[in-house]
Image (cartoon, coloured by chain):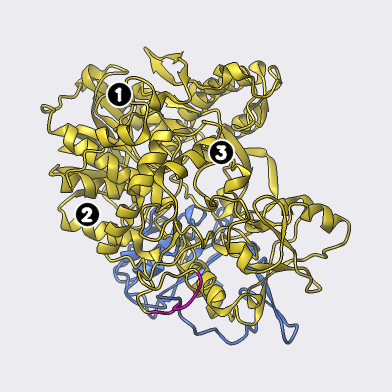
Chain colours: A blue, B yellow
Amino acid sequence: MPEKIYMLPNPPTPNKGMKFNPEICTGCNACVEVCPDDVMMPNPEKKKPPIVLYPEECWFCGGCIEECPRPGAISMMHPASQNISVNWLRKKTGEYFRLNQKNPPAPNLRPPSG
Amino acid sequence: MTTWHDYIQSGKPVPEWPYPVNYDKENEIECDVLIIGGGVAGCHAAISAARYGARVVVADRGNAKRSGAGGAGVDHWHGAVTNPCSRVTPLDYTLACYKSMRGFTSGIARYIICKERWDTLLEMEEMGVQIRDIHDEFKGAPFRDDRTKLMFAYDYVNRHVIRVWGYNMKPALYAEMKKLGIGIFNRIMITSLLTEGGKQGAKVVGATGLNTRTGEFYIFKSKATIISTGGIGRLGSFAPELTATGSMSDLNNAGNGHAIAWRAGAELVLMEQSGPARLSGFGYAPYSMGNAHNTYHGVSIVDTEGKEVPWVDAFDHPIKTIEERFSVAPGQPFQLGAGIGIGHYLPEYRSPELIHDLPERIRKGEFKLPLYADLTRLPEYERRCIWGMMVGNEGKTRIPIYDRFSKAGFDPDQDLLQAPVMSPENYYHPNFWGGPMMTHLRSLGGGGMLVDWDLRTSLEGLYAAGGSPLFGSGCHGESHTTGRYAGRQAAIYARTVSDPSVSRKQVEAEKARVYAPVRNPVDGIGWKELNYAIAKVMQDYCGRYKNEMTLNLGLRLLRELRDNEAASAYAANPHELGRMLECYALLDVGELVLHASLARKASNSILDFHRLDFPTMDPPEWEKLLPIRLEDDKVKVRELPLDFHLKPPFKADYEENYREHCRLTK
């Protein structure tokens, strides 16, 4: 909990668009530079992750992640309404899975073609 | 800590704007060819013009390395009819589109595209985009030509749609532009065209722009100018909080290129054409749900009990095998494939689809929801090609879909991907991820700037390229191709032109217009509220059904918005100012669409255009184009035959016109 309780506008929707891992991100702002919609702004503190200012303008192209020199620094945060919509059924076991579920199945490690 | 809210709650003060702001400060740039919009069309135009010796400048609203509808990649390249495996000719393909649209598409754009789309793809290969199965991953697959290693989509017999590994199209174009020394001006929103003497309808001599980070003003002086901007999605379907900004276009798609051309006096056609819109992304990220369309063409769809939904061929006859989903029906010449910017296909050019009475059969209980895409029923090469090759390279699928789904454990070898659960009527079309039909929303399509065989607009010095601003163009590969062609034309034209001189009066008037929202009192409404209001007018007064009264009321309300809410609207920083100016562009385009709709006093089935006061469908005397423009700020409409491109001053033959105008030096 923050030390003070602030007067703030409601959180935007979607809340984030993307999330930064401060352990990996070096604040190089390569993502800020390339974003077609200027969703992120450089952090006033140097070497800190950018600030997502306009998440509702993100069109989820993934360009920020492709541009990032440090894999894992940025994760895409689709809105919960979209995560809850993507469901799949494992044919053999009959198990249901969805994006962002609490105990996800093992990742599929096969890279894309090419 | 990621968002602004997080930052504030860590006890830090509200951060100041991170870029130095200098409203009014002027920057002047001179060039031979100015490209407005650095999407795939604009970047390819720039490269082409530079290769023809022009000094080229690209102004892009975002960052040309990733921006535009094609900025996030592409998985198949349509209509490469001159590739060595194709069995379709440029004329056959052009006529298939032209006849399917009953003449309401551009024969010029179609033919040029057919002649040069394969060569354009070869250029992308030279720039580092993989267009062949060089690693032999799909050796022996029926869609692969083992000699050229090209891979085809949809119609495996006629082989003109090429599957490509195009996730890096934009970075490849960007690197080439850098190599050629092209001046790239990112974060520049072009706000107006400059014309000789500042006169509407006169020769275009440049453009003005705004840097949406610094607020600085740009004056571009150019001998030739190309508009290659994006679509107009925000005009009617605006709901960024809900949609994650739509499917195949981002918020920058505000019809800005159409608006500046319209205000400068250029002629546009078919702006009255629209189609049914879905609020794509309303809960479903593009390509994220089970479906059987486009990238997913040919995938087996099963119901909750594993019962497979049958397919039919182009003539609605049942087909049994998976192979037939990718083949031609008996008597069918060839298929065009989906997503080429035409809204209507004659049966002989259609691709196989799921049965068309699926909604009815769901209602009767024959198929039980939910439905699933069952990739496991496809042969391994087809499954891997759809999930892994196409999903992974198509726009917004590498990171948002392939990478994210794989990390979450989705495995196409053993999992069924659920389709959206919707009311039965929404399963009429196999592109399920588009979500339910929103009957109050329309999406514009097919209209744009009227051009000649040089892709020159009605204004001297102004050219058009790309899927949206150019009348009758469409998809990703087409945008590259018209860009490449227009770039060549503009560069050659620029050699004949003396240095441009701009009207200071025109610049001053534009500066006053551009900076008004940052000078207004802070209590004016913001850009989003204005955008919602404009969209509401278009939804209510220019829907699928309209009459003289509703269209005139729509015009009145847009004028009201312009004089009142928009005139006093407020922008707090250069970013908001950019979005606000886009809303002003939407007001222009909204008026253009309403005027174009008023001019067509007849209903038209191809244009999905329904005049309640002229209900007779397709009267023959209205089978014509109605070019529309501003002259002294008054709307002027004239008539043009659908086949104007084969009438004087042009030749009566496609190939003859192309040869006379293409200006290929090779």
SS state under label 3: helix
| Residue situated in front as seen by the camera: B71 or B489 | B489
Percent across and percent down for residue A109 are 50, 85
Could you give the CA–CA distance between mark 2 and mark 1, rounded to whole angstroms? 27 Å
According to the image, label 3 marks what residue? B100
Percent across and percent down for residue B181 are 15, 53
SS state under label 2: helix
**Residue B361 appears left or right of A12:** right
According to the image, label 2 marks what residue? B177
Q: Are marks 2 and 1 in contact (CB under 8 Å)?
A: no
Percent across and percent down for residue B192 are 32, 30
Could you give the CA–CA distance between mark 2 and mark 3, rounded to whole angstroms? 37 Å
Instruction: Answer with mark 2 or mark 1, whichever residue precedes in sequence.
Output: 2
Q: What residue type is labelled 2?
A: Met
What residue sits 55% from the left and 73% below the top?
B382
Mark 3 Cα within 10 Å, few/some/many (few <14, many 20+)?
many
Q: What residue type is labelled 3?
A: Ser
Query: What's the mark number on residue B459?
Result: 1
Q: Which amino acid does label 1 sit on?
A: Leu
The chain carrying label 2 is B
Q: Quadrant of residue B35?
A: top left
| Residue situated in front as seen by the camera: A36 or B124 | B124
Q: Give the range drawn in magenta.
A: B136-142
Comparing labels 3 and 1, the label whose residue is closer to the camera:
3
**Residues at discs 3 and 1 both on one chain:** yes
Determine the main secondary structure of the stretch shown in magenta.
loop
Quarter that holds the N terminus of chain A = bottom right
Q: Quadrant of residue B225?
A: top left
- Looking at the image, can residue B351 be seen? yes
